[in-house]
Image: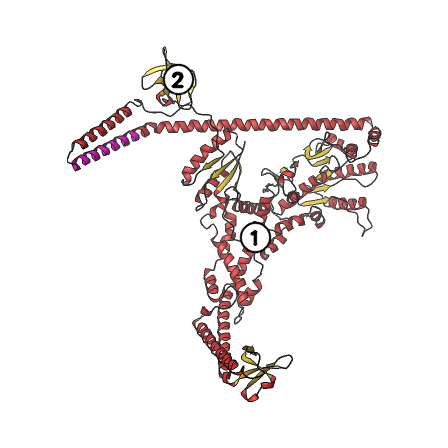
Amino acid sequence: MIDEHTTETLEFSKVIALVSGKCLTRFGHEEVAQIAPLRGRELIERRLAEISEMKDVIQFGDAFPLYRMETDCRELLKRSEVEGNALDGKEILEVLELVIVSIGLNEYAADDREKYPLLSEYLEGTRAFPEMRTLINKAIDEEGYVRDNASPKLRTIRLDLADSRRKIVAKLETILTRRAKQAGWQDDVVTQRNDRYVIPVPSSLYQSDRGILHDRSQSGATLYVEPKETVELNNRINLLMQEEYAEVQRILRELTAEIGRRSASLIENTRMIGRLDRIHACGLVSHEIKGHGPEIVDEAEISLVEARHPLLIVQLADIKKVVPTDFSLGNGRQVVLVTGPNTGGKTIALKTIGLSLLMTLSGLHISAGEKSRIGLFDNLHADIGDEQSIELSLSTFASHVRNIISGLQAASSRTLLLFDEIGAGTDPKEGAALAEAIILYAVQKGACLVATTHYSQLKTLAMDHPEIENASLEFDRETLAPTYRLHLGLPGSSYAIEIAGRLGMPRSICERAAEFCGTSERSLADLIATIEKELATIKQDRKELTERLKEARALEISNRARSEQLQESGDSAIDDYLIETEQFLNDTRREVERLVADIRGSQASKESVQEFHRNLKKKQKQLLQRQRGPKEKPTPKAMVAVGDAVQVLSLDKNGEVVQLIGNDKAKVRLGNVTTTVPLRNLALLDSSGERTLESKHVGHAPNEDVSPEIHLRGMTVDEAMEALNRFLDRAVVAGLQQVYVIHGKGTGALRKGLTTFLKNHPEVASLRLGDWNEGGSGVTVVKLNT
């Protein structure tokens, strides 16, 4: 059980508001409003997995087919089920909006559903009605009016109406033109009154026998009269208008009936859309806070890796400004007492722990690393902040005590208690004693407890109770500023005197306070500060060692890949050589045949024969040069170094490499003679003077710079993956932290194939599509484990 007081204390409602703000439909808002702690591991894991799939869609897939829907047509759908009802045009457009969204969701990623098995259940559960889209679009225009061609009868009626209106207006204008010549006549505009066409007549000129009076102006000076000459036309127009209305209503009733036959499925679609909208909103928030779904375990434990408070990330709009927290509770560690300076981040750390648990139990991603683990707690109770109650006439201390009592009453082995400044607000000696008793009581009940405190007395509890551990928020004594880093296993100091001095307290006061504090207290504070400094040094050394290990591992991977590549290329080298030679001979034969044909065509003139002989000698020379190539089967290039024993293939002599020249030549000493030889004309020798098995030809690998981008457009997926794998090996060895894979937009098949390959590559830390100024969806930006 998690009470409302705890959820409000941990600001869970703000997290819900953050998610709700990402929703696009009313159905989604309703789903998000119901987010609360779930019961059962399977349901929690499913919710987390759904968000993970949606995050992949947001980052790597095509745009998800949801857009803002301001209306809720469920009531209209229920009305459509009643026989004889007719929705108006605008109401039918609201239903059309639902139909269009349903079609888009049903068709989304139809050929790629295996990647998103959980989302596919909702997508496939959203029924598509393309025939309804066609019917409605044919009958109703964008403004909600029934179209002229909605039926042949309506088209005929409206054509007759338009013709009759033109005739009556023309006739009335003729009357106005004729009467305008009379004295006192001013207005000459045809208008309508009571759905009948009339003309304005000065009251002084009105003659009742010449027309029907329909209306008068406010001043009474003008009368609106229907001349007798147009009564029949007006009557026809009114009859046509009635026919038009009847036909429009018939069309609307038919459309309503079609909607009614599908209303149950469309109402079910609103539920599917609501769930997908909720998952999509959660995915957007997870992407914003760099969230992950932690591993769910049955034990009552919490293990957070680089956890951050999600609302703080959103507030600062930069995740790098929020210091991550590593925290572990459970597996023998039942209580963690957090000490440290004021404004050092103790309360934020407490809220981060509580909110991470609450979000996880509610099926939401948390801002923490993928290796985080969270257990199934049945109860979470938090007492954080100053909660003085004026209404209940309770002091701050009394309010805290009441909250703590409430938490302890429900405490069990699956309870997490979060107490901020435990025992504060009263006499320090009594407060510390009360806090110690509360902690030991929680231990006795088997509950997990995280508490912040400034009481030095509580720091010694960990010495006598192995299930209790200290933790501290780091404080930089050189800058006199908190670093907000949490250290488990180390008690902290409040640094009240140092902070007071930093805030402007006179130095004499601070010095006297230090004297009052006592030598032992100051010595303990100095010792803790020294340990913190040493710990920071150790962490930095560990970080550098980790980076070096990564470099060594990258080099090992690169060398292993290069070795495998050399072996593979060696097996096919002779086949490549034979194919090239055969191709050369075929080209030569075709050239000779062409020359013979030219000779025949020119009737063997002297000039053509001489030209033939010159070309033939040229081909013979090329063939001889080709035959002087390697007599042994070619083998892959291997590394060569100064001092290596080699054979110069063209001379069939052995020698020693004395110098490397550029990337493709070497100086070789042959007895008393030194000569420059292309690397392709060399073969390595072993200690016995025989050619090495792994390589007959040698080459020198240049130490060239590695470009941070690779172009793969136009390649097949297999070709691109092979090229990308080699490129990543070089990039890791070169120490690149980020590279750009340019695959283009196209159909998206190449991008999807490369995305799958990159997500499973051991040297890829993360990847994303390029920003607008990086190439957009035609580029994937890859961060490497360097």
- Residue type marked 2: Lys
Q: Is residue 673 magenta?
A: no
* Disc 1 versus disc 2: nearer the observer: 2
Which sits in the foreground, 267 or 652? 652
Q: Residues within 10 Å of mark 2 (few under 14, many from 20)?
A: some
Does 569 sit above or below residue 27? above
Question: Does residue 694 appear left or right of residue 363 in this picture?
Answer: left
Does 26 sit above or below residue 664? below
Residue ID at (31%, 28%): 577
For mark 2, give the secondary structure.
strand
Q: Quadrant of the C terminus?
A: top right
* Percent of width and height locating residue 101: 51, 57
Does 715 sit above or below residue 128? above
**Magenta: main secondary structure:** helix
Can residue 414 be seen here? The reply is no
Which residue matches tag 1?
Answer: 277
Which residue matches tag 2?
Answer: 667
Which sits in the foreground, 562 or 116? 562
Q: Residues within 10 Å of mark 1 (few under 14, many from 20)?
A: many
Residue ID at (48%, 78%): 170
Can residue 422 be seen here? The reply is yes
Which sits in the foreground, 125 or 718? 718
Which sits in the foreground, 147 or 750? 147
* Percent of width and height locating residue 754: 46, 40
Q: From this viewpoint, which residue is outermost toward the left?
A: 603
Q: Which region is colored magenta?
A: 578-604
- Residue type marked 1: Asp
Q: Is residue 593 magenta?
A: yes
